[in-house]
């Protein structure tokens, strides 16, 4: 069976912070030992990365440590980011949501019940009869297993297309120490 990747879509959360802003935030909001300050300076200011997109409404959300609020942050930004990327991929592929026969979602930055796939399917208006699979806790490399699972789903069912979504909202897992 020949499997073809027909569309690719990407998306980022809406809040952007430069590396300088991130460094200033850490040095302003936390008491850092000199070695820690040097480490943050090295990580945030000495590389080629200019900034990062954050799954937060405001940078001060990084101070939040309540697990329920962190999970709510993941749900909000994981859901909207994944759906935006999925819509772009579907548009590039020329596929309508009603044509989707399977959905596979991988993430390790938030654990939901029901899984993120349920929320994505709802937001995209996918049929309730499609096959769902959530891959959890495998890290960024799970995108490969996601594609392998999609190929397996196509081989077993003989119908398609299958939508594969890999989403990480690392800012939903920040646990700063004070």
Image (cartoon, rainbow, N blue to C red):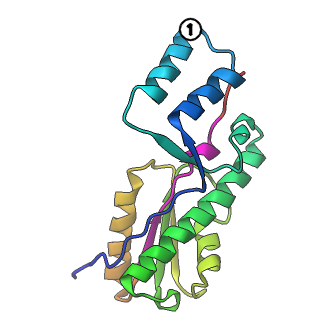
Residue located beneath label 1 in the image: 34
Bounds of the magenta segment: 162-174
Q: Is 65 in the magenta?
A: no
Q: Is residue 112 visible?
A: no
Residue 62 relative to residue 66: left or right: left
Q: Quadrant of the N terminus?
A: bottom left
In percent of the image, x 54 and y 65: which residue is there? 82
Q: Quadrant of the C terminus?
A: top right
Q: At which x and y percent is residue 157?
A: 38, 85
Q: Is residue 108 visible?
A: yes
Q: At which x and y percent is residue 105?
A: 50, 65
Crowd rating for badge 1 (residues with CA inside 10 Å; few <14, some 14–19, many 20+): few
Q: Is residue 162 above or below residue 164?
A: below
In percent of the image, x 62 and y 72: which residue is there? 118
Q: Is residue 70 above or below residue 22?
A: below
In percent of the image, x 38 and y 30: which residue is there? 47
List the single residue furthest toward the left.
Answer: 2
In percent of the image, x 67 and y 59: which residue is there? 75
Q: Secondary structure at mark 1?
A: helix
* Closer to the camera in the image, 103 or 59: 59
Q: At which x and y percent is residue 31?
A: 69, 15
Q: Is residue 122 above or below residue 96?
A: above
Q: How many marks?
A: 1
* Closer to the camera in the image, 172 or 52: 52
Q: For residue 81, what is the image quadrant?
A: bottom right
Q: At which x and y percent is residue 87?
A: 50, 76
* Closer to the camera in the image, 38 or 170: 38
* Closer to the camera in the image, 47 or 87: 47
Residue 73 relative to residue 95: left or right: right
């Amino acid at each position: 069976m020949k499997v073809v990747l027909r569309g690719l879509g990407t998306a980022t959360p809406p809040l952007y912070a430069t590396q300088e802003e991130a460094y200033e935030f850490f040095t302003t909001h936390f008491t850092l030992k000199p070695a820690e300050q040097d480490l943050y300076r090295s990580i945030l200011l000495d590389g080629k990365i200019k900034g990062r997109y954050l799954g937060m409404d405001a940078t001060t959300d990084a101070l939040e440590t309540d697990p329920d609020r962190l999970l709510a942050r993941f749900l909000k930004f994981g859901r909207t980011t994944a759906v935006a990327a999925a819509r772009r991929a579907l548009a590039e592929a020329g596929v309508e949501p009603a044509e989707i026969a399977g959905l596979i979602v991988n993430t390790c930055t938030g654990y939901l019940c029901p899984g993120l796939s349920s929320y994505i399917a709802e937001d995209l208006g996918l049929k309730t009869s499609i096959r769902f699979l959530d891959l959890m806790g495998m890290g960024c490399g799970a995108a490969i297993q996601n594609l392998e699972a999609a190929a397996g789903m196509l081989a077993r069912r003989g119908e398609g297309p299958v939508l594969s979504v890999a989403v990480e909202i690392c800012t939903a897992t920040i646990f700063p120490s004070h």
